[in-house]
Image (tube, helix red, strand yellow):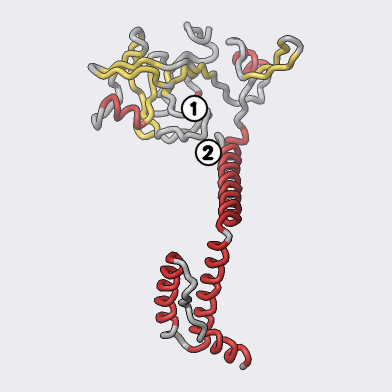
Amino acid sequence: MRLVIELSVFEQIPFASEQETDSERILTAHLQRFELLANKLDGITAQRVIMILNYFKIAFRHLSKNSGFTAINSIGLASGMTAAILIMLWVRSEFNFDRFYADNDRIYAVGMKDVWAGESVEHFYTPKPMARALKTDFPEIQTITRVDKGTGFLLTCQDIKLAKEPGVFVDSTFLNIFDYKVIAGNPQEALKNPNQIVLTKSLAERLFGHSNPINQTIRLDSTQVSTVSAIIEDIPDHSFMKGSTLSGALDINGKNRLFG
């Protein structure tokens, strides 16, 4: 009962005041509209809403009278929240990097550790015969593939030329390890020959429009003519293969100008 009496008295506190600034008068007008809506509710609920509206007005008046202090705190709060969100997005991206493959817990990248000028340096580059040696010396390895990432391809299709397109040369076993969604073509046969090429969906549309690109030819770097053997979904940004096309190469036991 005491709560009802106190709220009834509090309800009589006028919103308007002669000392109010223009911004406070605007806020008061909005609060009065909310008050009229609140009065249509049942007694206790209406009184609680009016009390909360008055709290908003008191808080606004306090913040406006201490504008410098309010600005410093607001900027600090906004900066802190922005930094926290950016850090969260970065951590999420790191944890999700190349985790969308079905067997991501069984896929490993082989690298090397060297010593340069007395300092240990790690990088993911290996000699060409490494794949064959790993396959021979470690029978527990089920599948292995090599990836040679260049600086970008020049792709030519009739009158269309696309320069610096990201792409890689890979072994025929590549799509057995990295299970990208294949839209068209046979993933088991897509990279069997060194003159085959696999395009992402968006790149295929840029080159061929809405026509069927399978078995169409593309000139690669103005020298090699490659046949489109499959189309895959666009590769996500959080992948080491982001946006790449796949150009076929021989198996690890074969030899060509790329892998040796």
Residue 24 in the image: above or below residue 38? above
User: Which badge, 2 or 1, comes first in the chain's sequence?
Assistant: 2
Q: Which residue is mark 1?
A: 241
Query: Alpha-carbon neighbours of circle 1 within 10 Å: few (<14), some, or many (≥20)?
Result: some
Inspect the image, locate mark 1, and give the three-letter code of the amino acid beneath it.
Answer: Met
Element type at mark 1: loop
Q: What x and y, as percent, mark residue 109?
A: 61, 25
x 73%, y 17%: residue = 120
Give the labeled residue for mark 2: 100
Vertical placement of residue 200 versus 135, above or below: below
Report the front residue among 108 and 251. 108
Q: How far from the left and from the top, in percent, is residue 211?
A: 24, 29
Label 2 is placed on what type of residue? Phe
Viewer-nearest of labels 2 and 1? 1
Question: Which residue sits at x=47%, y=78%?
Answer: 15
Q: Specify the farthest residue to the right.
A: 118
The residue positioned 46% from the left and 35% from the top of the image is 236
Q: Residues within 10 Å of mark 2 (few under 14, many from 20)?
A: some
Task: Give the structural element (helix, strand or loop) at label 2.
Answer: loop
Percent across and percent down for residue 228 are 33, 22
